[in-house]
Amino acid sequence: MALYSNRQLRIVATICVASVFLIGSSLPAGADKGDEASKEKQALAESGPKVGATIHPFFVRAVTGPHRNRSVCYVCRYGSRPVVMVVMQKVDPKIGSLLTELDTVIDKNRVSGLRGFGVLVTDESSRAVPILQTMAFDEKIHMPLTAATTAIAGSGSHNLHPEAATTIILYRGQKAVESIPLKAGRINEKEVSRIRDRVTRFVRK
């Protein structure tokens, strides 16, 4: 004997179809994976200090450069100069190639006062030292690479998005001009070229 009559089956089918229609109509127009990706991209675009925000002095542990093994405030040392500050919350596999390209831009514009430094945000500074030393040696990076704790250089200090592995902060006169956030794994030849052009435009303004 059938468990349900034909009439009961028709009623169940009607309810299912209506439920699917109601669920679909409750979503905002265009709410799909594309919108989620757009929201994520927009959130990342907000990583870093807002334009015009003050870049407050903070001390880092210099791992490479002329002040290595010392506590240094590069924001203080560079003063009103245009600066490229690369804040790394995670070490991207391709970050070395980006730093090398930024080195080249800085060297070409040193007469204009352009300076730069990298900061690895970590609460385990002992692990940061060999990572940064190896990176500087392998990629022949000249800009100072440093380490700082989350409390000093992390999201609370520079408004970093948690998904931004790297945030490049361009500032002049200790005022933020532009921030360029990058998710982990997003650094490639095309992206490096795009960032190089943006830094070049920044220093020529």
Image (cartoon, helix red, strand yellow):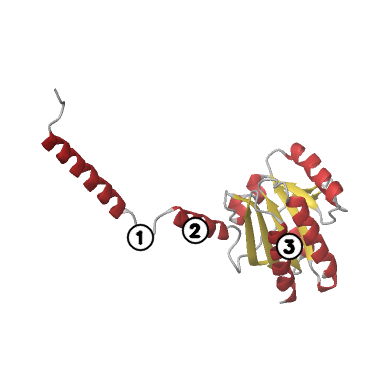
Q: What residue is pinned by disc 1? A: 29
Residue visible at 83% across and 51% down in the picture: 139
- Up-down: is 151 above or below 188? above
Q: CA distance from mark 2 to mark 1?
A: 14 Å
**Helix, strand or loop status at disc 1:** loop
Determine crowd level at label 2: few under 14, some 14-19, many 20+ residues with C-alpha closer than 10 A: few
Q: Is residue 138 left or right of residue 93?
A: right
Identify the mark nearer the N-term, 1 or 3.
1
Residue 62: percent from left, percent from top: 80, 49
Q: Nearer the viewer, residue 141 or 150?
A: 141
Query: For the residue marked with disc 3, what is the amino acid?
Result: Val
- Say whether disc 2 or disc 1 marks the residue closer to the N-terminus: 1
* Residue 98, position as x, y percentages in the image: 75, 56
User: What kind of element bears circle 2?
Assistant: helix
Q: Label 3, on which residue?
A: 84
Task: Look at the numbered disc 3 and give the secondary structure of its residue.
Answer: strand
Q: How far is the residue under mark 3 from the one under mark 2? A: 27 Å
User: Foreground mark, 1 or 3?
Assistant: 1
Residue type for callout 1: Ala
Circles 1, 3 touching at the beta carbon (< 8 Å): no
Q: Where is mark 2, residue-wise? A: 38
Q: Is residue 4 left or right of residue 87?
A: left
Q: Residue at x 35, y 60 (%)?
A: 29
Residue nearest the observer in this picture, 193 or 118: 193
> Which of the pair 8/133 is nearer the observer?
8
The x, y position of residue 105, in whole percent, is 80, 66
Reading the chain from its start, which is encountered first: label 3 or label 2? 2
